[in-house]
Image (cartoon, rainbow, N blue to C red):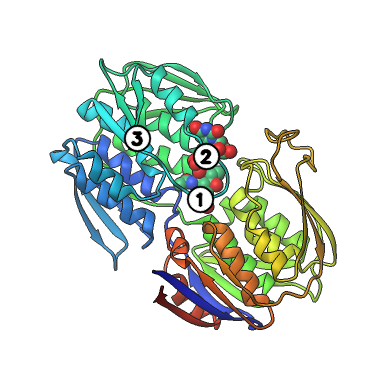
């Protein structure tokens, strides 16, 4: 059984949407609650699948979790923390990548953790070697067995001098969530410094952690024996904001995103303006619309923060199919994040993928067999088609292209979108999209 969304294209999206806490922060802040000796409260919580997954995993580990959905607030009491059943962890985690972040907190509390074989979006191999490597350096023993990976701490974990080969968001969070209660000092070089990382640091600081972020991607953590609880309002989801902003541009609409924060979107707003979009920033949000009749092509490279984020790339490629001329996009974060362009090409877009690095940002994928650069010629007239949602942002892009296309499209596998977009169908309908919301079909 799968869900099908029917989209009749050609209507500009107009109106307002609200974005709440970031998908890439809230579940991690929930994991941090495991480190505390007292209850924690996270606010501004969106109703998305990743929050449900972590709620389930915390409960399996004996944490009392109360979710007030209307208030967007989750209360977590870890005082009854216990070992969970591996089969249940596996069943509950589904294809989420969050379970790997339970390792540090669980090793501090009960000496061991189990990571089921992980899922996530179909955007590359997404290995966990950096995670396992740093855990070993804290003193953990890692053993890969059928169905998952066992991590054990035979002794108390000890702070270490660490360096990541690439500023991975997840591996940086892994280090933070482990080092805060390890013995002694941890120094992490080559850390990710995304706004969501800073917000996780704020959460940990509220719990009693001592963390310094230096100017050169080095994070220094002084381990403490005990942490308390926290009370925190999550930063808003800048990736959801960028998606709706791009929807306004592509459909020639006008969308006010309540909760959009300029501070976390500088790189996006520059590109948005260069393509021909316009925006007006207010205290409570940002209004986005298409500035003139034509969109401009451009050369773009994704990068780690403060660069242009990879999660903004996929929706933006749809806008570039509508620009007058040739655009180049060099994806340097994931080796395989252009798979979604197949459906755009079937809809009429002109996109060629290349293995070469078409850009100057240092990239790990050059001279290898990865189609990680795209040349997009526009403007192309898009026609509705049937497609299957490949991954979260790729899925948003497909829906966006269908909204801008002539005729009708049918999207299967639409559940993937609920991993990161709260009340997606309601929001689309509120903006005036002509859609038939999902029914289950065989
Ligand atoms: N990498 C490794 N080994 C590792 C870890 C990462 O090779 O052990 C590589 C990855 O394969 C990738 C690169 O390092 O090529 C960056 O991966 P990173 O660890 O930074 O990504 P992540 O933590 O798994 C988070 C977000 C992603 C977002 C990236 C980059 C969450 C739950 N996910 O993933 O969000 O694209 O950081 O900012 O926070 C999305 O929201 O659609 C999404 C995919």
Residue linked to disc 2:
126
Q: Position of residue 42 (x, y in %)?
A: 31, 51
- Precedes in sequence: disc 2 or disc 3: 2
Q: Is residue 307 above or below residue 429?
A: above
Q: Which mark is residue 148?
A: 3
| Label 2 CB-ligand 1 distance < 8 A | yes
Q: Residue at x 66, y 44 (%)?
A: 307
Viewer-closest of 222 and 85: 85
Residue linked to disc 1:
121
The answer for how far apart the CA atoms under marks 2 and 1 are is 9 Å
Q: Position of residue 414 (x, y in %)?
A: 47, 67
Disc 1 element: loop
Q: Position of residue 384 (x, y in %)?
A: 65, 77
Q: Position of residue 228 (x, y in %)?
A: 24, 36
- Precedes in sequence: disc 1 or disc 3: 1
Disc 2 element: loop
Quadrant in which residue 15 is drawn:
bottom right
| Quarter of the figure that contains the C terminus | bottom left
Report whether 317 appears left or right of 80: right
The reply to whether residue 293 is visible in this rendering is yes
The answer for how far apart the CA atoms under marks 1 and 3 are is 18 Å
Q: Residue at x 64, y 52 (%)?
A: 266
Q: Is residue 132 above or below residue 239?
A: above
| Contact? badges 2 and 1 (CB < 8 Å) | yes
Report whether 86 appears left or right of 134: left
| Label 1 CB-ligand 1 distance < 8 A | yes
Disc 3 element: strand
């Amino acid at each position: 059984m799968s869900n099908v969304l029917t989209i009749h294209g050609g209507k500009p999206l107009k109106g307002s949407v609200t974005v709440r806490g970031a998908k890439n922060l809230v579940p991690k802040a929930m994991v941090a609650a495991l480190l505390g000796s007292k209850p924690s409260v996270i606010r501004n919580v969106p109703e998305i699948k990743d929050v449900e997954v972590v709620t389930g995993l915390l409960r399996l580990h004996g944490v009392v979790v109360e979710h007030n959905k209307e208030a967007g607030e989750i209360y977590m009491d870890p005082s009854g923390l216990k070992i969970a059943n591996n089969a249940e962890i596996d069943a509950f985690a589904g294809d989420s990548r969050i379970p790997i972040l339970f390792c540090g907190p669980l090793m501090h509390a009960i000496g061991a953790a189990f990571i089921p074989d992980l899922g996530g979006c179909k955007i590359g191999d997404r290995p966990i070697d950096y995670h396992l490597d740093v855990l070993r350096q804290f003193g953990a023993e890692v053993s890969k067995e059928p169905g998952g990976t066992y991590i054990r701490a035979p002794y108390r974990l000890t702070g270490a001098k660490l360096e990541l080969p690439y500023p991975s968001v997840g591996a940086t969070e892994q280090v933070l969530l482990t080092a805060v209660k390890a013995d002694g000092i941890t120094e992490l070089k080559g850390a990710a410094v995304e706004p969501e990382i800073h917000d996780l640091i704020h959460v940990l600081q509220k719990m009693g952690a001592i963390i310094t972020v230096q100017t050169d991607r080095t994070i220094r953590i002084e381990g403490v024996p005990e942490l308390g609880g926290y009370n925190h309002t999550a930063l808003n989801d800048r990736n959801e904001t960028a998606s709706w902003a791009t929807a306004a541009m592509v459909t020639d609409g006008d969308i006010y995103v309540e909760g959009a924060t300029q501070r976390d979107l500088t790189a996006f707003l520059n590109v948005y303006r260069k393509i021909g979009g316009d925006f007006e920033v207010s205290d409570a949000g940002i209004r986005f619309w298409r500035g003139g009749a034509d969109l401009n092509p451009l050369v773009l490279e994704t990068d780690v923060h403060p660069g242009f984020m990879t999660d903004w790339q996929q929706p933006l490629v749809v806008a570039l199919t509508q620009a007058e001329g040739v655009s180049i996009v060099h994806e340097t974060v994931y080796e395989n994040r252009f798979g979604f362009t197949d459906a755009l090409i079937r809809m009429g877009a002109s996109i060629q993928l290349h293995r070469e690095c078409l850009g100057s940002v240092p990239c790990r994928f050059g001279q290898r067999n990865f189609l990680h650069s795209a040349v997009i010629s526009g403007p192309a007239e898009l026609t509705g088609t049937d497609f299957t949602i490949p991954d979260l942002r790729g899925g948003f892009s497909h829906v966006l292209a269908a909204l801008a296309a002539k005729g009708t499209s049918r999207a299967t596998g639409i559940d993937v979108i609920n991993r990161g977009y709260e009340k997606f169908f309601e929001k689309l309908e509120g903006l005036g999209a002509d859609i038939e919301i999902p029914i289950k079909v065989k």
